[in-house]
Amino acid sequence: MSLTETEIKESIIDTYTKVASNGRLVAERFYSPEELQGLPTSAVELALGVGNPVRHAGLRPGEVALDLGSGAGIDTLQAARKVGPSGKAIGLDMTPEMIRRARANAQAMGLANVEILEGPMEAMPIPDASVDAIISNGVINLTMRKSQVFREIHRVLKPGGRFCVADMLINGELPDEVLNHPTAWTG
Amino acid sequence: MGFEEIVAVEWKSFGLGDLTRYPLFTKEFLAFLKKIMPPHRHEELVFSIVVTARKPREAAAA
């Protein structure tokens, strides 16, 4: 039996609310020591992405960057450092506990150019054509409505704006038992 | 609607060993995957990719 969108969303929020740190195992795979330097432990140890989109996003001072599924903030905070005080890094997440953590991490770094918003990436609480660059790290795979997410990306990007997405791509077929397993949707 | 300059800048195999780094997956789930997936897929369950793209400078309305 297939999972419904509501069941998947509830499972994702539950998983990301309860997730415990696994140390630096994920962060050290994708980020250099220089990139991790100065980031709060909570942000580094709750890195749950599958790549390093900030490295490829070409962020420049003064730009507005949006991080879809910002989690505890590891990519949002790095984006904030890249765009500098004249720019802005916006994190968007649907899990209140992760929003709390990301805000605390931005505050711990003394970053005034970070804003963490609560909302779904399928209906972003972001004005049209207001963002220079969008990053996302292992998050778009979590939604059943991927086309809607890309419509939203298109809507909020300025003309000429770009996105850099790190994510998973299925290699061939996966058995139904895996595709319909809640953990496969939340991880 | 559309995007341009779409480029896959990274493309890497992602296997069972990689999943063990994540606190999202229980030992039971990893054991389930190991059992249900054929051995030749264990080192390459999925790919991790990084893709960049751009919204056209004169984009039509979505």
Image (spheres, helix red, strand yellow):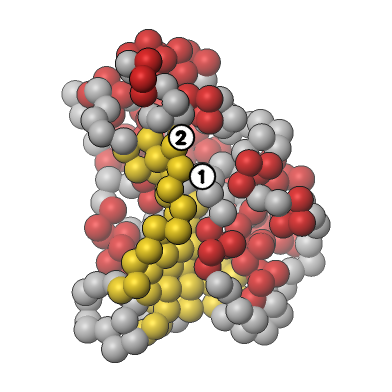
Q: Residue at x 23, y 24 (%)?
A: A176
In the rendered view of the protein, which quadrant contains the C terminus of chain A? top left
Q: Secondary structure at mark 1?
A: loop
Height in image: B51 above or below A83? above
Left or right position of A1 against A114: left
- Residue A50's disc is 1
Instruction: Residue A35 in the image: state x and y as whole percent.
Output: 72, 57
Q: Is residue A127 visible?
A: no
Height in image: A75 above or below B34? below
Instruction: Residue A126 in the image: state x and y as whole percent.
Output: 43, 72
What residue is pinned by disc 2? B14
Q: Secondary structure at mark 2?
A: strand
In the rendered view of the protein, which quadrant contains the N terminus of chain A? top left
Amino acid at pointer 1? Val
**Pick the front one: A98 or A132:** A132
Q: Chain of mark 2?
A: B
Q: Residue at x 56, y 31 (%)?
A: B22
**Pick the front one: A103 or A151:** A151
Quadrant of residue A79 within the rendered picture: bottom right
Q: Is residue A53 visible?
A: yes
Q: Residue at x 57, y 62 (%)?
A: A54
Instruction: Residue A117 in the image: state x and y as whole percent.
Output: 53, 63
Q: Residue at x 40, y 30 (%)?
A: B44
**Pick the front one: B56 or A103:** B56
Q: Chain of mark 1?
A: A
Amino acid at pointer 2? Phe
- Of labels 2 and 1, the one closer to you: 2
Instruction: Residue B57 in the image: state x and y as whole percent.
Output: 34, 87
Marks 2 and 1 sit apart, C-alpha to C-alpha, by 9 Å
Height in image: B51 above or below A155? above
Is the residue under label 1 in contact with that under label 2 (CB below 8 Å)?
yes
